[in-house]
Image: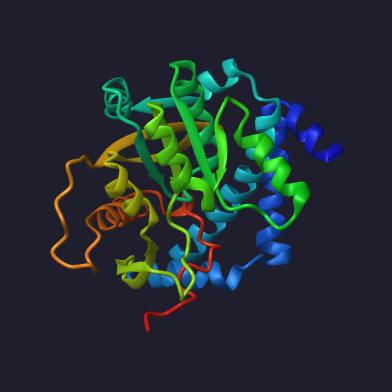
Amino acid sequence: MLLIRFIAILPFWWMYRWADFLGWLAFRVIGYRKAVVIDNIQKSFPEKSEKEVKRIARQFYRNLGDIIVESLKILGLSEKQLQKRVTYKNYDILESRLKEGKSVIVMTPHSGNWEWLLLACSYLLVKSGFGVDAVYKPLSSQFFDKLMIKIRSKFGADPTPMNQVLRNVITRKKSGEVRVIAMVADQRPLPNESNYWTTFLHQDTPFFIGSERIARKVHFPVVYTSICRVRRGHYEVNFQEIADPPYSKPASPEEHPIIEKFAQLIEKDIQTHPDQWLWSHKRWKHKRS
């Protein structure tokens, strides 16, 4: 805990020296999931040479080091520092729906620094009087679970366990609350779960369908929100519409147009900034039965 507090109060220039060390350690010394990272990049970009794949991998580990120290830095981050380091594009897409009295489901991938994305959005939204439910999967370690809750609630977001989301959404809708339900929605589903399969980065890929089910059940609009590192320690948050009610019934139970649009938007972002996605995730571990 002392190390975490130490990193949180470090100046940015010194903090990134730690990030460089962690990235180098993970890539060169430990080789943290290195085979998984290389394999994922090769299969996602079959047109790229071995040299290009290794370059993306090196940049990914540098990005991973930045994510770790920047996430810990949140504990000591001020509003003024956040304002200097994050800009917003198309925020009116989200804001206009909230001002109409509509709660919104926000879907985002593990790209850029998703912890700073939650921080940046909750800072704007809570200040404007809108609640933010940050959906998360509780960690097995009680220490790290409490740490991540503290980080994610820094500027007023309300961390919400996955198994409580639908109940909370329905309850708050009945009470008339206008909120954002924020979901990092590109995780790998378990093979026994209901999911949607599509071609993503040249591979047969499953996606959770919970966000679409909730959107259709409560008639909430869905907005894609991404964060891109424009330079070290500086980010741009971008908002794009995915879907708006009323929703038409899909032609078949296997069709999930909201999830399909989400997958297409993630793919486009990854192709633009391939080093900023979480390649160490075993995204294609399970195959379609």
Q: On the picture, is 260 further left or further right than 44?
A: left
- Residue 46 or 210: which is nearer the viewer? 210
Residue 255 against residue 117 in the figure, above or below: below
Splitting the image into 4 quarters, where does residue 256 fall?
A: bottom left
Q: On the picture, is 8 further left or further right than 257?
A: right
Q: Quadrant of the N terminus?
A: top right
Question: What residue is shown at x 76% (from left), y 26% (from top)?
Answer: 9
Residue 111: percent from left, percent from top:
47, 48
Q: On the picture, is 42 further left or further right than 35?
A: left
- Residue 126 or 93: which is nearer the viewer? 126
Residue 113 against residue 189 in the figure, above or below: above
Residue 257: percent from left, percent from top:
22, 56
Residue 181: percent from left, percent from top:
43, 39
- Residue 13 or 145: which is nearer the viewer? 145
The answer to whether residue 73 of the structure is visible from this angle is yes
Question: What residue is shown at x 58% (from left), y 25% (from top)?
Answer: 155
Furthest residue toward right: 2
- Residue 178 or 244: which is nearer the viewer? 178
Question: What residue is shown at x 36% (from left), y 70% (from top)?
Answer: 205
Q: On the picture, is 120 further left or further right than 178?
A: right
The answer to whether residue 232 of the structure is visible from this angle is no
Q: How is the image coloured?
A: rainbow
Residue 266: percent from left, percent from top:
35, 52
